[in-house]
Amino acid sequence: MARHRTGAAGLWIMARTPLRHLPATPTVSHSGAPSPLSDVPDPSGPSDASLRNDRSAAGSAAARVPADPGPLVLVVEDEPAIADILLAYLKRDGMRTQFASDGQAALRLFHQLRPDLVLLDIHLPGMDGVDVLKNIRSGSETPVIMVTALADDVDKLLSLRLGADDYVVKPFSPAEVVARVRAVLRRTAARPAALQAQPIRVGRLVVDLEAHGASTVDDHGELQPLPLTLTEFRLLACLAAQPRRCFSRSHLIETCLPESDALDRVIDSHLSKLRRKLQNAGHGELIETVRSIGYRLWPGA
């Protein structure tokens, strides 16, 4: 039994088997069953002909089956010992990994690398994990698993409400984390690829979450880019994702300005500028104000 202790609070992560003693992947017989005797050498030794045949067969198989690089997991954790364990177990399971120790670095790597999944600790220095999640969800459906402390039920509920795909509670088994990662990747891979990649279209408005840009279709069917700031794009993407739904000002602040302490009037200012740009592009009153509630995108307005 190996124990790893990190942090002033004395957090323990239990790993049933030390990494250096993890068993090697068992060899598999031609029938597909594990073959423990296949590692026992033949006392007479292999013949030269059999070696040549084995090398030829292995080369042909390698040529036919390209190597799978495995999914890329971004691990965001400020405790080095915890991060090292998670990275080691994920790599051993065939995944590629990247590491960030704070929220700002996590967002930089996220936008640069576009990982397949983010394993995100809530309690980070500076920008915490909830704010990182809000930022990711403002323009991406990349699966996110939150790592929370045992007593933080509020953190768990908030994370799920903001769009986290799953959560893991400390202290945890690293093997369980790997299993959760695999389960979420399988679940999200089952989504129709067309729905994942297809831009949002609302009338003549096109919002491309992957390219992080918006455009309008002109009278000739050509796309004309809209000159939006990052905040304006986030607001438009949020509204366009669910046309006709009314969003409160507080929800728009939490989703589109997670790193800011903006007040309601700041959102009003951003939306006023966005509305004017849409009007100049020929979209009319596409964004409507719902008195005493918030804003909504109303197609055909």
Image (spheres, rainbow, N blue to C red):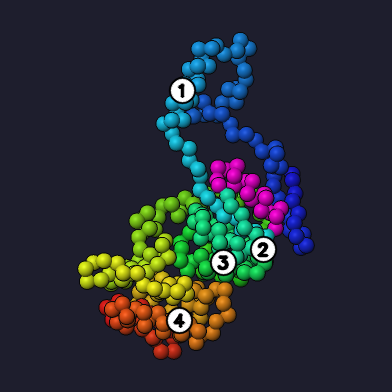
Residue 64, horizontal then vertical, whole percent: 41, 31
What is the crowding at mark 1: few (fewer than 14 residues within 10 Å), some, or many (at least 20)? few
Camera-side mark, 4 or 3: 4
Camera-side mark, 2 or 1: 1
Q: Which residue is mark 1?
A: 57
Q: Which residue is mark 4?
A: 270
Q: Is any atom of residue 96 visible in this view? A: yes
SS for tag 1? helix
3D distance between C-alphas at marks 2 and 1: 51 Å
What is the crowding at mark 2: few (fewer than 14 residues within 10 Å), some, or many (at least 20)? some
The quarter of the picture where residue 300 lies is bottom left
Looking at marks 1 and 4 on the same chain, the residue that comes earlier in the sequence is marked by 1
* Kind of residue at badge 4: His
Residue 107, horizontal then vertical, whole percent: 55, 63
Span colored in magenta: 79-96
- Main SS of the magenta part reads helix
Looking at marks 3 and 1 on the same chain, the residue that comes earlier in the sequence is marked by 1
Camera-side mark, 1 or 4: 4
Q: Which residue is mark 2?
A: 149
